Amino acid sequence: MDAYLDLLRDLVHQFSDPFAFYRELIQNSIDAGSARIEVRLRFTPGAAAGTATAVVQDWGEGMNRQVIDQYLLTKFRSSKENDLTKIGKFGIGFLSVFAPSPDAVVVETGKDGESWRLLFRPDLTWELHDSPEPFEGTTVTLHKSMSAADYVELAARSEESVRSWCRHSESDVAFAAGGPDGAPPPEPAPVREPLAVDAPFQVEYREEGTQIVAGPSRANPPRVGLYNRGLTLMELEENLVPGVTFKILSRYLEHTLTRDNVRRDRHFDRAVDLVKRLSETKLLERLPGELKAAAGDPARAADHLALLSYATRCTSLPPAELWYRSVGGAAADGGAVQRTAAWAGAVLCAREPSPVTEAMEAEGRVVLLGEPTDPAVRLAARACAPDGAIASAASRYIAARADTRPEAQALARSAGELLALVGARVKAVMVGRVFGDVESEAAVRLQSARGPTRLVDALASPFKGGGGDLLCLNTAEPSVDASVALAARAPDLAALLLVRRLSVAAGALGEKLDHKLTERVLARARPPDAL
Amino acid sequence: MILQGPDAEAHLCALRALLAVARPGAQYPEGRSLSERLRFLPAALEIDPRSGLPALRALGQVDAERALAPEFLEKHAAALPDRAPRFRALLEATLEPLHRVQVRLIHRDGDTSRVQLVRDLVDPASGCLVRFTIVARQRGEGQVSFVRGDLSRASSQLTGAVEEAASGDAEMALLALAKLPGLTPEDVVRGQLGPLCTARFPGPALLAPALACAPDGAVLHLSLERAGTTVPEDRCLDPLASLYRDALSPEARARVEARRGQLGYRVVKERRLVCTPELESPLKAALSAAGARLVVRSR
């Protein structure tokens, strides 16, 4: 008998988590067919210490004397052995109630018209009494003396434990704890959470005995949850199905004897195969649409990255079904990103919209939202640029916006005439604001007034070949800005000063040309009657 | 009987509240699903006077409406926007079928298997909701076949037999199923929700005086019968029922007893009552006076 008790004590100690008894008792309640299970804690203050009681109550089928004798009081025998409709198997789960070292455990239960009250002492001995009051289901009550402070911790850890084991339970599991001052527990509140995975979207599969939800994982390795009738068997991080986070509820999954793992048997393999099939069918079918929706929604950057990462790493979706976030806010398909990359020699990106990106998008080019170092941009480059090249749009291209003020227009006209006089190789001159990595230049050459221009072309000297035909005098540069202000009063003088500055800087102004320029301006400034 | 407006609402409200208190487990019809179904019943509520529960026609109408929901939402939701939320809610609701047979594998060992059959129905004799849960041992795959080794499929012969057996009590069902070749029923549980008794639908005479004490009170009956080889002894603890064989002629009873000896089962019948708080004491007093020992509770 001593050896038997020693063995039982060893078994009690296998439950390293003293709160594992909630899992075991709730598992028994679910197996007993209870639709609701309540966990209630209460503290009764005393002179020195108080007494905490933890109650787990169900309204399931209960136990008759035969079940109590054969399966509750005889360890290693389980009425649920070889029963695929039950979660528990080994007949040792009830022992877990002794893991928190209670002062007493009381079990009240009824079945087939019998009602029983069992009292267990800390040394694992017990008394069984026939109860005159009829019982419904099974109620297990643990009593333990402790301080109010310890009770507060007990209540917090109990709730955490119950939520962790039972949040997807088939049965309604509800929890309530009274206060450390002796206040009774309120009406127990359900701990159940909807069955969902942490993914941008999820797909579902059901068959008799098994329910699966799965989605593209945000984390690597993905989080995986395994449950029997909703009770947590195990949650782990493992790449069982690459890139897919999932939860499997199956009455065929079983935990191991030590409760710290799931049996990796044919049922487990089959369940994982079902997830693989789900990822290759429903999940894959929805992926392009979800990717497009996330790419077009400014608030869903994290979702988009998770989806894109999954799509590029774990599927072979064609470029046209991969969607990216453009800086303009619209979703752009991989085909368009590829075409822009072929044109520009790199995937283009920008942190925010600018006239440069707007000019590019107006021409049907795609500028991705983000820095070159952003993971989503790098994934796009890997998929869409031949050598994976990435460039900031503003470092390769510029754009300009015309200044429509009359003085700016007058300055442009006058400067155009003078530049022609000194042999500049441009066909037209505009005054405007230049955007891109050339904002300190006084003048740049443009391919067109609205579209983008390659930076290398923009910097070509107006007095030499190459570059665009349109010269833009950049009002972002202080001397040009001052010239526009002067042009309000004396546009020719402003143009003369500006053109002289540009010509000198380009080494294109000799004494003869300078004289010519001055003469032209003075001639236009002379009153008509003076001719 | 048709209840209208506030009367119908009060009746449904009482039923919903008592279902929440009853917390019927797996041996009974799905309480949560029934509660959900009550949300969709029409304002003019047809009650089955025998059970005090919504009539089968009213309960079944919810399924018919739900079947129409996808088509309505696709074709008519724009033209009739005020009706669309109801159809959407119907589609989202968790409604278990009122009538069905489910079969699940418990264990399989070579040629022998143990299976669980669950039959839900609205009992035509009482108008109450009933669930039969049958555990049976099978040799071969004559009645239940297995797809992929674990998914179970019942034969049409078995489905028909279960439907037929479910017209009586647990013992009758066990005896009927024992006639099927290759199948040995071990345990049959019959769980019943109802009747719902109020002053308007007083139900059994034993409890009527208690109900008269509280005109706004309500009582929901949950009765449970088990016929099985692990039942310790024959017991009829339900003051409103009797054992099947007690109602038989001596000759018929002898035949049943002989069969019972072969099959090795015993029968227990129980009942529990959930009620509104004001009825708990009067009901307990009435039952105590009648010598009945039942669970009666209001929370």
Image (cartoon, coloured by chain):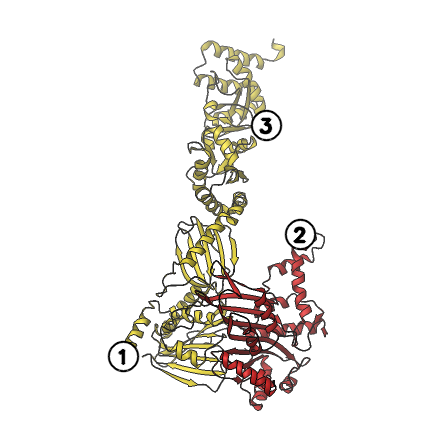
Chain colours: A yellow, B red
- Crowding at dot 3, Cα within 10 Å, few <14 / some 14-19 / many 20+, comes out as few
Q: Is label 1 in contact with label 2 (beta carbons under 8 Å)?
A: no
Task: Provide the chain ID for the residue under circle 3.
Answer: A
Identified by mark 3, the residue type is Arg
Identify the secondary structure beneath mark 3.
loop
Q: Is residue B65 left or right of residue A180?
A: right
Identify the secondary structure beneath mark 1.
helix
Query: Which mark is on residue B74?
Result: 2
- Crowding at dot 2, Cα within 10 Å, few <14 / some 14-19 / many 20+, comes out as few
In this view, the residue in front, A224 or B228, is B228
Q: Is residue B14 above or below residue B279?
A: above
Q: Quadrant of the C terminus of chain B?
A: bottom right
Give the alpha-carbon distance from disc 3 to disc 1, as whole Å. Answer: 103 Å
Query: Which mark is on residue A405?
Result: 3
Spot occupied by residue A373 in the image (x, y as percentages of width and height): 41, 39
Q: Is residue A414 left or right of residue A40?
A: right
In the image, are marks 1 and 2 on the same chain?
no
Residue marked by disc 1: A2
